């Protein structure tokens, strides 16, 4: 199997930022029926990068919609290796970042998992349950392989720890917009802009806000401060409701258009 040359996550996001634009990173659950077609539609609709979830049976950060999608993917036979193998056979034209949980990385072994990601054309990793203090082994393996490890910062993170998080982060910094699990919200949490501003004050890396970004209007609002957004549950809901790459692409396109208009 021919390896796909990874597209740099950080370079793509910085290029969007340098042009005066705002970054859009949709999330899709790997392993659902037709998920690779969904990735192509999302890339064509204006995503700057795509976060691909590798399903896990005990997802501590995921809300009901993404949990449901993970359960469906697992029931359909999705495995970490199978998802990476599909990515290795396709080129999507935008950087890919894998989001999964540290237990799966531990079972692979850090070095092997990082190398498999590179073989699959993945340039970023998001491990929400990997504490900064326990990240050394994974981050060392990822750095050697060329995988950019995105660190997460919560609204309650103290200032001193925030500095250490951004120093270790690669690709971008994931600003968690609110306390709690992923899911759609009727309005943007006040904490989303606050954590984005705190991060912007201490890093030159792109700062993207995720968790609780449900509509194009909310994306525009938080991007008054942030460099971009990660949109998960709203997109996965569309996947589950329609199973249509065209419909999913239309939704992502509505976020892209709104961010372009500002």
Image: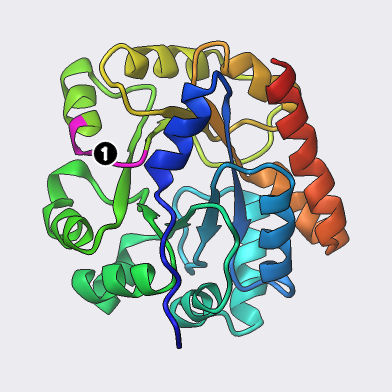
| Foreground residue among 222 and 211 | 222
Q: Is residue 254 visible?
A: yes
Q: Is residue 179 visible?
A: no
In the image, residue 247 above or below residue 11? below
Q: Position of residue 124 (x, y in %)?
A: 38, 53
- Which span is picked out in magenta? 167-171
How many tags in the picture?
1
Quarter placement of the C terminus: top right
| Foreground residue among 219 and 181 | 219
Q: Residue at position x 58%, y 23% from top?
A: 21
| 36 relative to 8 in the view: left or right | right
For label 1, the residue is 169
User: Which quadrant of the structure image shows residue 22?
Assistant: top right
Q: Residue at position x 37%, y 74% from top?
A: 119
Helix, strand or loop status at disc 1: loop
| 252 relative to 77 in the view: left or right | right
Q: Position of residue 247 (x, y in %)?
A: 86, 52
| Foreground residue among 212 and 112 | 112
């Amino acid at each position: 199997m021919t390896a796909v040359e990874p597209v740099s996550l950080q370079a793509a996001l910085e290029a969007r930022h340098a042009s005066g634009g705002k970054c859009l990173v949709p999330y899709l659950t790997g392993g659902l029926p037709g998920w690779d077609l969904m990735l192509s539609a999302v890339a064509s609709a204006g995503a700057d990068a795509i976060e691909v979830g590798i399903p896990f049976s005990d997802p501590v950060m995921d809300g009901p919609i993404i949990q449901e999608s993970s359960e469906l993917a697992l029931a359909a036979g999705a495995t970490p290796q199978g998802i990476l193998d599909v990515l290795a056979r396709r080129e999507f034209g935008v950087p890919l970042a894998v989001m999964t949980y540290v237990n799966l990385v531990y079972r692979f072994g850090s070095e092997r998992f990082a190398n498999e990601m590179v073989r699959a054309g993945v340039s970023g990793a998001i491990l929400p349950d990997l504490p900064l203090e326990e990240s050394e082994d994974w981050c060392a393996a990822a750095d050697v392989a060329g995988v950019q490890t995105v660190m997460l910062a919560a609204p309650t993170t103290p200032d001193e720890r925030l500095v250490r998080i951004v120093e270790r982060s690669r690709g971008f910094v994931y600003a968690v917009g609110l306390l709690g699990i992923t899911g759609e919200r009727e309005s943007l949490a006040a904490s989303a802009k606050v954590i984005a501003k705190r991060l912007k004050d201490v890093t030159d890396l792109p700062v993207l806000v995720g968790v609780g970004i449900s509509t194009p209007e909310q994306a525009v609002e938080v991007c008054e401060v942030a460099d971009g957004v990660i949109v998960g549950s709203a997109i996965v809901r569309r996947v589950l409701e329609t199973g249509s790459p065209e419909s999913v692409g239309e939704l992502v396109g509505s976020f892209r258009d709104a961010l372009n208009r500002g």
